[in-house]
Amino acid sequence: MKAECSLELEFDSEKMVKAVLKSVSVDDFDFVKSEIIGKKLFSKIQSSSISSLIHTLDDYLACVSVAGKVLDKN
């Protein structure tokens, strides 16, 4: 079984979305494909099972959240 999820996340600025993607893309490997359009980050997460997809999605969103909070403080 193959499971996938698509995300669309909008940020306050293009600078911020680029910084977030740079921070989280280190761990993407083959699981996450991302692109930026304007102030939006589009990500597609793929996995071999639903439970693995949920785990990957949880990790990815946690990393995006931390990166966003760090950037907000600067």
Image: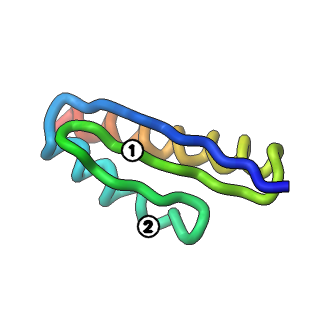
Residue appearing at x 23%, y 45% in the figure: 37
Tell me the distance, in whole angstroms, between the alpha carbons under discs 2 and 1: 16 Å
**Left or right position of 55 against 9:** right
Mark 1 belongs to which amino acid? Phe
Work out whether residue 56 or residue 73 is closer to the camera in this orientation and state it. Answer: 56
Query: What is the quadrant of residue 2 in the picture?
Result: bottom right
Work out whether residue 14 or residue 19 is closer to the camera in this orientation and state it. Answer: 14
**Left or right position of 15 against 36:** left
Query: What is the quadrant of residue 69 in the picture?
Result: top left
Label 2, secondary structure: give it: helix
Residue appearing at x 86%, y 55% in the figure: 1
Q: Is residue 12 above or below residue 46?
A: above
Residue appearing at x 58%, y 51% in the figure: 45
User: Which residue is label 2 attached to?
Assistant: 26
Label 1, secondary structure: give it: strand
Residue appearing at x 31%, y 59% in the figure: 22
Name the colouring of the figure.
rainbow
**Left or right position of 15 against 26:** left
Q: Is residue 2 above or below residue 40?
A: below
User: Which residue is label 1 attached to?
Assistant: 42
Q: How far across and down, in percent of the image, does residue 30 sit?
A: 58, 69
Label 2: few (<14), some or many (≥20) within 10 Å? few
The residue sitting at the front extreme is 1
Q: How far across and down, in percent of the image, does residue 66 sit?
A: 42, 40
Mark 2 belongs to which amino acid? Val
